[in-house]
Structure formats: C-alpha cells, structure tokens
Amino acid sequence: MSPGSNKPLRRLALPLVISFTLRNLFALVDLGFATSLPNSASAVGAISFWIPFQMVYIALWVGLSSGVTTTLSQALGLARSDLSERIVRAVKRMLLVLIATLVALGALLPFVVPSFGLESDLARDFTIYGSILAIGFPITGFWSILPDSVVKAHHDTRSTMVAGLLSTATNATLNAVFVFVFGWGLAGIAIGTVLSRIPSLVYAMLRARRLDAEHLASLAVTGPPVEASGSAATRDRIALQLATPMKRILVLGIPSTFAFVLTAIEASFVNGMLAALPDSTEKIASWGVFHQILQLSLMPIVGSAVAVLPWLARRVAAGDFAIIRRELLTTGLFCGLLSLGLTVLPAFVYPEQIARRILTTDEGVDAESLALAVDALRLLPFVALASLPFVLLRTSFEALNRPRLAILSSALRFLALSLPLITLGRWVGLTTELGPIRGMALGLGTAALLASIFVSIAVHTIVRDCEAKLRGGL
C-alpha cells in the first residue's frame, strides 16, 4: 500500500503547507535581490511585469498536474497498475508537445517586447528576465509534473515538501552566487530560478520510481488494498473514464487552469482600476504589498488544497464518504488557524516595517504608498479567512467527478462577484474616507466570502448524496 494512504488529510497536508509557505517567502527574497541591483526600479518592474506571463505558466502547470494527480490517484485507488501505465504514457506525450510549444513561443518574446510600449530601461530588463524564464522554465519545470504527480498520488507529501525545499534553497543560493559573485544582475536571478528546478526534478523522479516499485511489490504479496473495496458501480465508472487517460486528464485539469487564468484576469483588472486613478504608481505599489502578503497568508490553504485532490480522489474510489466529511472539516479548521497566525504580524504588529521593506528601492520609499499599504494590510485576516473554503474546496469538485462545478465556482468567484465588488469597493472608497485601496480590498474579501459559501454548500451536498447512494447499494 502507498505510504500515507491511511493518514488523516491534515497530516498529509502539513508538509505541503510548509513547502508552499517557504516557497512564497523565497519569492519575496527574490525581490530583495532585485532591489540590490543598480537601477533597481526597472529590475523590480521587470519582475512585476512578468507576473501575468508567470500566471499563464502556473495555470498550465497546475491544471495538467491536477489532472495527472487525480487520474493516477484513482488508478491507485482501484489497484489497477495497467491503467497507471497507460496514464504515464499519455502524460509523456502531452509533455513533449507542451514543452516544445512553450519553448518556441518563449523564443519569440524578445521580438514582441517592443510592442508593449515600455520605457527603455524596463523594456531592456524585461527582455532579459522574461526571455530566460520563458525559454528555460518549460524545460526544467514542466518535466517535474509527472514525477511530482506520482509522488502526490501515493500520498507521499513529505517527498513533495523535500523537493520544494530543494528548489527554493537552490534558487536562493544560485541567486546569491550569480548576482554577488559573478555579477550577472537580473539575468543571474532568472538563470538561478530556471536551474533551481533541476535538483527537485531529480529527487522527485527517484522517489516516484521507488514508490511505484513498492506499490507493485505490495500488490504482488497482499493483493488489492482495502481502499479498493468501495462501491462496484463507482469503481467500474472510474475505470471506464481512465481507459481514455488523455481525455480524462484534460477534463480534470481544465478547471484548475481556468481558475488560475481568472486569477490573472482579476490581477490585471485591479491594476487597470488603480492605473486610472491619480498617483497611480503609488496606489499600484501599495496594492502590490497587500497582494504579496495575502498570498503568503493563503499558502497553508493552497498547500492543503494540493493534498486534498489526490487524497479525496482515492477516498471517493473507496467510497469513504463519512471520512471525507470529517477530514475536510478538520483540515479547514487547521488551515484557518495557520493562515490567521500568518496575518497577525503584518496586520497588527509590524505592518509599517513590512511594507517599508517591500516598497524600498534605490530611490527610497514613497510616504503615500507606505500609508496606503499599511491601511490595506489591516484587512488581511478578513480576506484570508473569507478565501479559505473556496481555495481549499474548489479542487474537491475535480476529485468528486464534478469538473463543471469547478469551472462554475471559479467563474462565480472571479467574474460574477470579484470584478463587480472590487469596482463597487473602489467607488465607495473614492466617495468616502475609506479610500480606494481599502475599498477594493473589502470588495475582494466579500467576493471570496460569498464564493466560499457557495462552494461549501455544494461540496457538502455532493458528499451527502454520494454517501446516501452508497448506503442504498447503488
């Protein structure tokens, strides 16, 4: 049996929580390297301007990884090694096509940058930074999708944590060497980011090979595990879906990709709203501080959501719906405590010091930007906790074989709720003493809260219905 297959969900999630939180912290450290460079304003701007492009890569990576992890988890839950092998072959073909396409598109980036209308220094730095990442990251980053998914499907989240820590530690080390020793500047930061994925890729490949071998040896000795004893109708339906793995991976992966694309749209929308205001540079910078710290506070939830997908897929195949309800509730409480803990210092104890550290460049720090950022940071606990159920449970729809609901919930969250409420918050902030930054942050938090209520009710209803059908022998 796979390691950790009977562990509580929160224990499986903890290594991922640690890994994702530390990765996010190292992302803030990367900005620190950029602020140490000559003409740091354009270097920081180049990294910031890359974010929408980065979101596209993340959307593709997370979407494909979600689909692969879920299908492999279901195959393992059914104790069907033949289906697992078919899935692996399909993934390798998909990766070859995807990586070749992304590298070719990345090579075109220097020819497209002039059309962005950037200032000369920013255009130069973005061409250097963006081209290296656009070409290099698909090669070193996307190959890890398969071994990483295999490891998570076996519920060995500790190895996923180790791989992530290897990557972040290597990234920080290489950045320091390339920037301070070799003097490669922004190019050194980009090259360090690309090369840092190699150690984690090698480690994940070795762990995936070992876990597969242990699983096959266990099946040969003991036969199918207990977790494969769920409803026969459920197992037959899942096996039929896995018989066409490429289609199944895409069906399960598209919702996650869609969610990240909408996240990028939301970020672009916010920047556009702020850019239309007077002193837009200061307001965009202030929102950036709030957004970066918010992402850090959400990392325990994001890490747990990654663990939910393979864990829930196997539990659904086994028909363990009573366990599913209990573990989702306790994991939600666990995430809430961790996220709340991460918001205490930036929201109530050191908001000014943290904002000052992020906003300071070689030209100093703008006083208005600092004040706006501090005001927004006070709202971190509300926005983080309001986002919790949506972030944690949205991936549950894929494991529960409801991918359309995953797409619907993302559209509800980002299009039907977030954009109008952020717009309303901006208007209220401009017409009252609230201010546009706090008004937009409140709009974002309210949208997250309403979407979280919808997702919580939907997941509870689906699990309850599945449990009733299993008890009825259907």
Image (cartoon, rainbow, N blue to C red):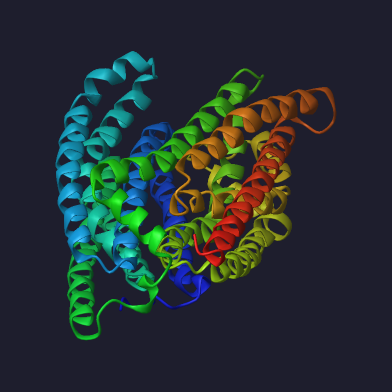
Pinpoint residue 126: horizontal percent, then vertical percent: 33, 30
In this view of the protein, can residue 357 be seen by the observer?
no
Rendered image quadrant of residue 43: top left
Q: Within the image, what quadrant is residue 368 found in?
A: top right
Q: How many marks?
A: 0
Pick the front one: 339 or 414: 414
Residue extending farthest to the right is 432
Seen in the picture, residue 453 relative to 114 is either above or below; the reply is: below
Which of these two is toward me, 356 or 459?
459
- Farthest residue to the bottom: give it: 221
The image quadrant where one finds the N terminus is bottom left
- Relative image position of residue 308 (x, y in whole percent): 47, 61
Q: Residue at x 33, y 64 (%)?
A: 153
Q: Position of residue 451 (x, y in %)?
A: 65, 42
- The residue nearer to you, when weighing 449 against 58, is 449
Please state the horizontal and vertical placement of residue 42, each as a whole percent of the image: 40, 32
Does residue 87 appear in this view? Answer: yes
Q: Is residue 143 left or right of residue 57?
A: left
At 57% from the left and 58% from the top, the residue drawn is 463
Q: Is residue 22 left or right of residue 446?
A: left
405 lies left or right of 154: right
Q: Residue at x 50, y 49 (%)?
A: 397
At x 54%, y 46%, the residue is 292
